[in-house]
Image (cartoon, rainbow, N blue to C red):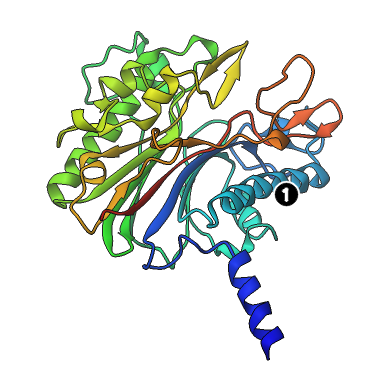
Amino acid sequence: MKRLVYAILILLMAAPAVFAGKPGRSYVIGFYNLENLFDTYHDEGKNDYEYLPDGANQWTDVKYNKKLHNMASVIRAMADENKAFHSILGVSEIENRHVLEDLVSQPEIAGANFQIVHYDGPDRRGVDVALLYRPEHFQVIESQSIPFTLEGTSIDFGMTDDEKDYFRTRDILMVRGLLDGEMFAFFVAHLPSRLGGKSGALRDRGGEIIYRRSMELMQEFPGIKIVAMGDMNDNPTDPSMTKYVNAKEKIGEVGPENFFSPFMSMYKAGYGSLAYRGVWSIFDIIIVNSNLCNAPKGTLEIKPIVNKKYYARIFRQPFMTNQEGQYKDTPKRTLADTGVEGYSDHYPTYIVVSNKK
């Protein structure tokens, strides 16, 4: 009997469940750009040809399965560090619901029982955003795929009418529900890329869309706690975040019409979630509204998690990082000359919310 009790205690200590349930009331909320998580089949109407077996990347089932394993390994590694799987994980650069179903069933993370919120969007390559959540922590009430339109704004995009008509990008996902009984809304975005000289005004518009919908939710549901996350293709100090989302660097600056941007101070201190031509950026941003950083006692609020100073974490481990060569110390992206060697060209980011004492 003593041996049985001892064995049970060891299993409980090893299980990633520190954040689970109400006693600790702490939850991990994160975002991960999965860098081109495509299956091996063509989606009608989408330009996914480079990710087919006979395409430029010779994207076979072997490569696809290795990619799934690598993505799941990172998510599992974060769970091991936090002693809990994410309660909420926003993802981007995923082709469809099928790849997410394959991902959440990987043995490394199947025990999290992640559920999926996903809509097929208008992006010409076929990449979307989605939300993974643990149903024992978060109960979905409604979700919305918000179109990325260029109408109803005073922003000057510097585009012709034909260019505006042709423009397509990812919708912005909004999911509202109860996290540990408290009303939350989560936004997941992948704002327009900088490639091809795309105007920053497009990303400004993305920030504006998130902000306007957030203010509507706060009016409709007083006290609602809002988390907006995504690959913003901008840094925390760019206008899309500071002007159009109205994000502030310090909690003391945050009022009812502001967001708190925990990555702003980290970016100024030299942190980065991706590198391009030797320059580090933080595009993988998570921001929270005033109700989550100035929370009433006994409710969930954002907590400092890095050096008791920073309210966010960039998850960077050696196995995810190039250890030598031209790209040393940068994220080990998916494709290499020898096949699927890496993970993503972005590091994942997360925050932790817990009960305010």
In the image, is 238 to the left or to the right of 83? left
Residue 194 % position (x, y): 49, 16
Q: What residue is rendered at 58% in x and 49% in y?
A: 81
In the image, is 306 to the left or to the right of 343? left
Question: Which quadrant: the C terminus?
Answer: bottom left
In the image, is 3 to the left or to the right of 199? right
Residue 67 % position (x, y): 72, 43
| Residue 103 visible in the shown view | yes
Task: From this view, report whether residue 121 is shown above or below residue 57.
Answer: below
Identify the image quadrant of residue 237.
top left
Residue 351 % position (x, y): 42, 43
User: Which SS class for mark 1?
Assistant: helix
Q: Which residue is mark 1?
A: 69
Front position in the image: 143 or 332: 332
Front position in the image: 208 or 122: 208
Question: Which quadrant: the N terminus?
Answer: bottom right
Query: How many neighbours does mark 1 have within 10 angstroms: few (below 14), some (14-19), or many (20 or more)?
Result: some
Q: What residue is rendered at 66% in x and 50% in y?
A: 72
Identify the image quadrant of residue 155.
top left
Q: What residue is rendered at 63% in x and 48% in y?
A: 77
Task: From this view, report whether residue 249 is shown above or below residue 115.
Answer: above
- Which amino acid lies under the numbered mark 1 shown in the image of this protein? His
Residue 218 % position (x, y): 17, 45
| Residue 171 visible in the shown view | no
Task: From this view, report whether residue 270 is shown above or below residue 107.
Answer: above
All told, the count of numbered labels is: 1
